[in-house]
């Protein structure tokens, strides 16, 4: 863990914030590159990415407060200040960003599916980089493990007695990087608009839903006596929504490109 990167006078600069800012920058760079390949205006895609990031920050915070509502309601001011620098819950941020993106795209008459194909790999890249911020901050940590790559996080209560835990943020970082690579490869071979975006939704839902079983922090919203987390519930909902849409659009794409009978 290395939560403070450096100081400017007495003001600490957090490692988490710097990495998140770098992740956002790299995501925008990737989105501009893919926008050109898709025939979309990179400037409009950049504006969209900025608005979506701002919405994601607000939505992520709101979802974090909802997921940990008991602690938040007991000490709202203290809770808010302690988590001020945290991005928040991913799916809350994603849904807020999706709503803002839909409004922006409609206003500027840009295809939602084409823009989604551009932004999905960019988002996966940003997530992969951003999870290193979680790693250095010590948040989103894993359960205890005897595996040789288990780590001791000094500020995590599970590690106070030397217990080693899963470096969970690194697991998701690698998973997100794999999704990014797959989507980037698929981008040039997509058969219908929205294919890359829908593959991202399916891939990330499977990744996150599985990795949540290795999480060790409890302040993220646990339900059914701690059996599942809020992120897992949302991942199942996203998966159940994305799969039929993918099949429908895939079928429509095949019909559109199939040769017509004379």
Image (cartoon, rainbow, N blue to C red):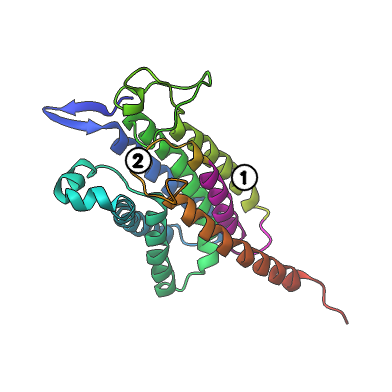
Q: Is residue 198 magenta?
A: yes
Disc 1 target residue: 182
**Toward the viewer: 262 or 122?**
122
Q: Would you say the magenta stretch is mainly helix, strand or loop?
A: helix
Q: Is residue 115 left or right of residue 15?
A: right
Residue that appears at 56% across and 58% down: 239
* Region of the chain picked out in magenta, as a range: 190-210
Q: Residues within 10 Å of mark 1 (few under 14, many from 20)?
A: some
Q: Circle 2 sits in a helix, a strand or a loop, which is it?
A: helix
Q: Is residue 2 visible?
A: yes
Q: Is residue 236 magenta?
A: no
Q: Where does the image place residue 155, in percent across and percent down from the top left? A: 29, 26
Q: Where, by quadrant of the figure, is residue 55 drawn? A: bottom left
Disc 2 target residue: 20
Query: Which residue lies most toward the right here?
Result: 262
Q: Where does the image place residue 34, in percent across and percent down from the top left? A: 53, 52
Q: Where does the image place residue 27, in percent across and percent down from the top left? A: 44, 46
Q: Is residue 35 visible?
A: no
Q: Circle 1 sits in a helix, a strand or a loop, which is it?
A: helix
């Amino acid at each position: 863990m290395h939560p403070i990167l450096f100081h400017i006078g007495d003001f600490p600069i957090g490692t988490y914030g710097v990495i998140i800012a770098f992740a956002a920058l790299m995501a925008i760079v990737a989105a501009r590159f893919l926008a050109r390949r898709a025939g979309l205006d990179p400037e409009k895609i950049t504006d969209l990415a900025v608005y979506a990031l701002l919405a994601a920050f607000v939505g992520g915070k709101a979802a974090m407060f909802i997921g940990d509502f008991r602690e938040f309601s007991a000490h709202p001011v203290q809770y808010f200040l302690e988590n001020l620098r945290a991005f928040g819950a991913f799916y809350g941020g994603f849904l807020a960003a999706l709503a803002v993106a839909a409004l922006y795209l409609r206003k500027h008459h840009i295809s939602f599916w084409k823009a989604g194909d551009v932004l999905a790999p960019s988002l996966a890249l940003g997530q992969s980089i951003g999870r290193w911020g979680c790693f250095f901050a010590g948040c989103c940590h894993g359960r205890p493990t005897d595996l040789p790559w288990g780590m001791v996080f000094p500020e995590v209560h599970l590690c106070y007695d030397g217990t080693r835990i899963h470096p969970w943020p690194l697991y998701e970082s690698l998973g997100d990087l794999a999704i990014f690579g797959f989507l980037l490869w698929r981008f040039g071979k997509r058969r219908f608009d929205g294919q890359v975006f829908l593959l991202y939704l399916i891939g990330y839902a499977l990744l996150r839903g599985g990795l949540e079983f290795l999480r060790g922090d409890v302040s993220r919203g646990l339900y059914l006596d701690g059996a599942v987390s809020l992120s897992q519930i949302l991942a199942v909902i996203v998966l159940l929504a994305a799969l039929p849409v993918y099949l429908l659009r895939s079928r429509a794409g095949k019909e559109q490109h199939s040769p017509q009978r004379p």
